[in-house]
Image (cartoon, rainbow, N blue to C red):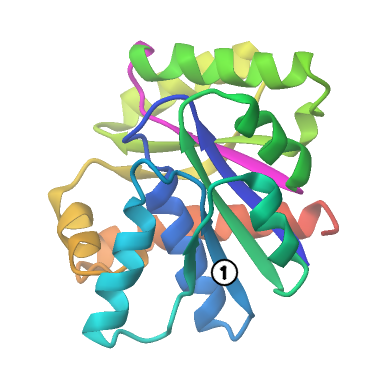
Amino acid sequence: MAIIAFVSQKGGVGKSTLSRALGREAAKSGLSVKIADLDPGQGTTTEWGRIRTAAGIEPVVPVQLYRATADAMVEADRHDLFIIDGPAKTSTATLDIAKAANLVVQPTGASRDDLVPAVREYHALVRKGIPKQRLRLALVRIGTDAEEADARAFLAEAGYNVLPGSLPERPAYRMTQNEGRAVTEVKFATLQKHAEALVQAIIDETVAANI
């Protein structure tokens, strides 16, 4: 059993996007998987799950809304992979999630408005005792190769590991998710490859950690 958590102190940076994509790929491979939506105020992944179910899209990706990390963790060991889609804010829940997870992934865009809060978030977790080796950053909403390179350099200087690959900024990803599909199910081959590569990087990090 592995627990992978997606966290951020900001909304709209890609937590739900990556949670859904990882859940879809795990379910497609035959694993028992569940996504725990820990943002009851928004519940965006829960709504996505309803749309997917209503549309009859396979594979089925179970999603459940929880109000507290402890409630979610009761079910974690019933699945091969338990994915936590954390709340869009910094709170005691974020620390609880990081403590429970085998791997913590924080998505971020390439602007300083995204990068600085992302680094601040991980600094806070490290000060609270979360090991750096459990923390990863994922680049999303990337415009150009130069922008990606600059973001990687900024995060590396801050001392954190960045996953290989990235998601470019494309309306097709949003449209795909509006239909209850994951970004790995986008109909454009090049965009699908980008999404699959980033999800595979998360899987590789999990395996490398001997989870």
Q: Is residue 123 above or below residue 142?
A: above
At x 15%, y 59%, the residue is 175
Q: Amino acid at mark 1?
A: Lys
x, y percent for residue 14: 38, 42
x, y percent for residue 55: 22, 83
Is 176 on the left-hand or right-hand side of 84? left
Q: Secondary structure at mark 1?
A: strand
Is 20 on the left-hand or right-hand side of 111? right
- Residue 183 visible in the displayed image: no
Q: Nearer the viewer, residue 58 or 76?
A: 76
Q: Nearer the viewer, residue 25 or 38?
A: 38
Q: Quadrant of residue 81?
A: bottom right
Q: Is residue 153 above or below residue 95?
A: above
- Residue 130 visible in the displayed image: yes
The 10 Å Cα crowd at callout 1, few under 14, some 14 to 19, many 20 or more, is: many
Q: How many marks?
A: 1
Is residue 181 part of the magenta span, yes or no?
A: no
Q: Nearer the viewer, residue 198 or 34?
A: 34
Residue under pointer 1? 34
- Quadrant of the image containing the C terminus: bottom right
- Quadrant of the image containing the N terminus: bottom right
x, y percent for residue 145: 32, 32
At x 79%, y 28%, the residue is 130
x, y percent for residue 113: 34, 13
Q: Nearer the viewer, residue 66 or 199?
A: 66
At x 72%, y 56%, the residue is 73
Q: Quadrant of residue 98?
A: top right
Magenta-highlighted residues? 102-112
Q: Quadrant of residue 208?
A: bottom right
